[in-house]
Amino acid sequence: MSLPSLAELSDSLRVVAIPLKQKFRGITTREVVLFEGPYGWGEFSPFVEYGVEESSRWLAAGIESAFVGWPAPKRDSIEINATIPDGTPEEAVAALNFFQGCRTAKIKVAGAHSSLDTTRLIEIERALGDSGKIRIDANGSWSVDEALKQISAFYEVLGNTLEYVEQPCATVREISQVHEKLSVPVPLAIDEGIRKEGYTRDLSDIADVAILKVAPMGGVKNALHIAKELDMPIVVSSALETSIGMRAGLALAAALPNLFGACGLGTVDLLGGDVISHSLVAEDGAISLRDVAPSLELLDRWAAPSDRIEWWQHRLTTTFEFLESR
Ligand SMILES: [Mg+2]
């Protein structure tokens, strides 16, 4: 990918700070850089603790959106799953209600409220009603033995409503052990394990589904390439982007030949605001592909404080220089 100049990125640069409806990933405000190119807008929003190499993939994805464009879509509407953060059962049901018409819920487990996980799952299953599907995401929290025990226990409660368990353990090696020893028919999905290790090989012998996100993979084209290497059904997920970043996730979901069910691209609903006036959120459980551009009024409303704008300008420069040097 040929890069624009830093000046081209900076010309249209805006930094926004949007409050979250509920604490997620330990943060309460989402800071995002946006810039415009000939193909539209791009988002650069690596989490603040990320180093320059990791951040450079997010920048490459944002540049692709604005200056390169995406492959032709194979479908024009993407089914969406609800994303339910850690919390009490009441908070979980409230979160589910943000996702209008979604029949699949992905629930974070093994967090601070883990003693309430089973109750939350039962409450969500009830709220979804018949034909609802539940996915569980442990974010690598369990040991192999804990995973075997927990997955069996959740299967006891949910039966075939349990569609898969995502990233039960931290490493690909541990997940492969769970895959081998698991005595209940619950598929396993691999998420952060793909980015942290070994995504360049076929992982179909150790997991059943792979989760891909556009920004950490360096863009739609790179993610499509990785999907081809992985050679298994793919669920596209997001990283708490605004509608601008989410549009890239939809572009990946639309272009994938082997998409598996609903995608985790409904997370604009977790933000307390957005930069476009008609947000990319699920309607009747799906999002239709369309062009998006920020509204000036919303860019002004969510403008970050000046010290944070400076911080992000510096980070963009450092990350751009890193990307350019590769
Ligand atoms: Mg995950």
Image: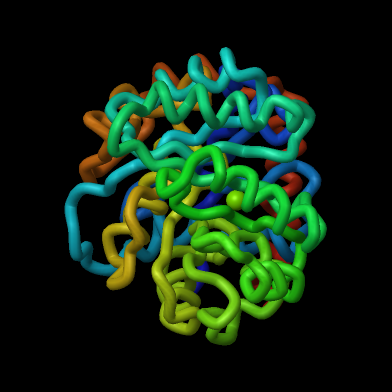
Q: Is residue 166 above or below residue 157?
A: below
Q: Position of residue 126 (x, y in %)?
A: 42, 24
Q: How is the image coloured?
A: rainbow
Q: Is residue 315 above or below residue 13?
A: below
Which is more toward the observer, 281 or 169? 169
140 lies left or right of 41:
right
Q: Position of residue 12 (x, y in %)?
A: 48, 41
The reply to whether residue 36 is in sight is no
Which is more toward the observer, 167 or 31? 167
Q: Position of residue 117 (x, y in %)?
A: 66, 31
Residue for point 43% across, 56% down = 236
Residue for point 72% across, 52% down = 149
Q: How many marks?
A: 0
Q: Position of residue 194 (x, y in %)?
A: 62, 69
152 lies left or right of 71:
right
Q: Is residue 315 above or below residue 287?
A: below
Residue for point 62% across, 71% down = 179
Q: Is residue 84 above or below residue 136?
A: above
205 lies left or right of 172:
left
Q: Quadrant of the C terminus?
A: bottom right
The reply to whether residue 96 is in sight is yes
Residue for point 60% across, 31% down = 85
